[in-house]
Amino acid sequence: MTAKIITVFNQKGGVGKTTTTCQLAGTLGYRGYDVLVADIDPQETTSSWLSNASEQLPFPGTLWTGHKYAHGGGVARELGKLSDKYDLIIVDCAPSVDNSSTWSSLLVSDLAIIPTKLSPADTTALPAALELAKKAQDECGRVYPVRVLATAFRKTRADEKMMLEQITTNSRYPMFKVLPIQLGDRVAFTRSMLMGATAHNMPKPGEAAAELDILADEVCALLGIPASKE
Ligand SMILES: Nc1ncnc2c1ncn2[C@@H]1O[C@H](COP(=O)(O)OP(=O)(O)O)[C@@H](O)[C@H]1O
Ligand SMILES: [Mg+2]
C-alpha cells in the first residue's frame, strides 16, 4: 500500500492543529485504516497525546516523531519510506510556515488541512498558509485539495465562519476552500487528550463525535477512498 498523506499545518500556534490531527487520526483508525500519526512539531504535543493512551483504551494508530529529520528534505524522505506500511499518514506540523519540515511534508501530501480558530487575530494568518500550500504544489507539480477547517466554532458566532469563507474566496487561491464541517468549541475535544483517545471515548461524546464522523467522511471523499476500510 502507498499511504495517502495529510498535512495539518498553519503558521499560527494554538489554532487546533494537534487537536485536529489526533481526533481525525483516531476516527480514521476506528474505521479500520492503518494510520501513522507523524508528529513533526518539536513541541511534541501529539506525541504526548498518544502517549496518554492505555492498554484498556489503546490509540488506533501508530506514532512517529520526526522533527529531528527537519534538514535537507528529511521529512519527505522518511514519510516516503513509511508510506509502504500504512493506509494514511497524518502529519502534525510546528506553528510556522517557514519551517522546513512543514514544507517537506507539503511536497509529498495528498491533502492539506489548515485548522484555524475564528478570531481575526487567527484568521489574518490564513493567506500565508494558503500561499505556502500553493508554492508547495507548484514545486512538486501536483495539485491536491487544500482545505481550511474552522475549530473551536460557536454557533452563536456563525458570521465568523462566513467571514472565513470570504477570506478564502477573496484570496489569491479561491480553489482552496473552507470545509463544510467545523469542529465546535467542545470540552470533549480537549479532554480526550488526557486519555490519549478521541472524543468518541468521552462519557458524553454527543455532537463532538458526530462532527468527527462528518469530518472523516469529508476527508475520505477528498482523498477518493472509502469512508471505512473494507
Ligand atoms: N474544537 C476545539 N474546542 C475546544 N478547544 C479546542 C478546540 N481545538 C483546540 N482547542 C484548544 O485550543 C488549544 C490549542 O489547540 P491545539 O490543538 O494544541 O493547537 P495547535 O496544535 O495549533 O497549537 C488547546 O488548549 C486545545 O485544547
Ligand atoms: Mg500543536
Image: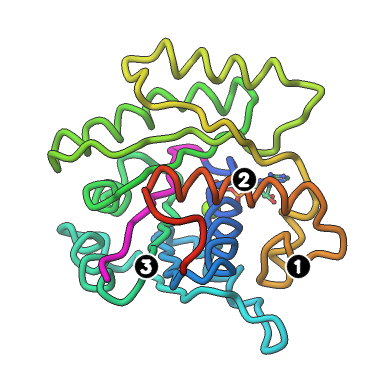
Cβ at disc 1 under 8 Å from ligand 1: no
Looking at the image, is mark 1 or mark 3 earlier in the sequence? 3
How far apart, in angstroms, are the residues tagged by discs 2 and 1? 17 Å
Task: Give the amino acid type for the residue marked by disc 2 in the picture.
Answer: Ile
Secondary structure beneath dot 1 equals helix
Q: Which residue position holds label 1?
A: 201
Find residue 171 and report its image quarter.
top left
Q: Which residue position holds label 2?
A: 214
Task: Give the amino acid type for the residue marked by disc 1 in the picture.
Answer: Asn
**Residue nearest the viewer, comparing 219 with 161:** 219
Q: Which stretch is magenta?
A: 1-12
Q: Is residue 70 above or below residue 172?
A: below
Q: Which residue position holds label 3?
A: 87
Looking at the image, is mark 2 or mark 1 earlier in the sequence? 1
For label 2, the crowd category at 10 Å Cα-Cα, with few meaning under 14, some 14 to 19 and many 20 or more, is some
Find residue 90 and report its image quarter.
bottom left
The residue sitting at 43% across, 14% down in the picture is 169
The residue sitting at 51% across, 12% down in the picture is 166
User: Is the Cβ of the residue at disc 2 closer than 8 Å to that at disc 3?
Assistant: no
For label 1, the crowd category at 10 Å Cα-Cα, with few meaning under 14, some 14 to 19 and many 20 or more, is some
Q: Is residue 108 above or below residue 65?
A: above
Expressed as whole percent of the image width and height from the top left, the position of residue 32 reads 52, 71
Cβ at disc 2 under 8 Å from ligand 1: no
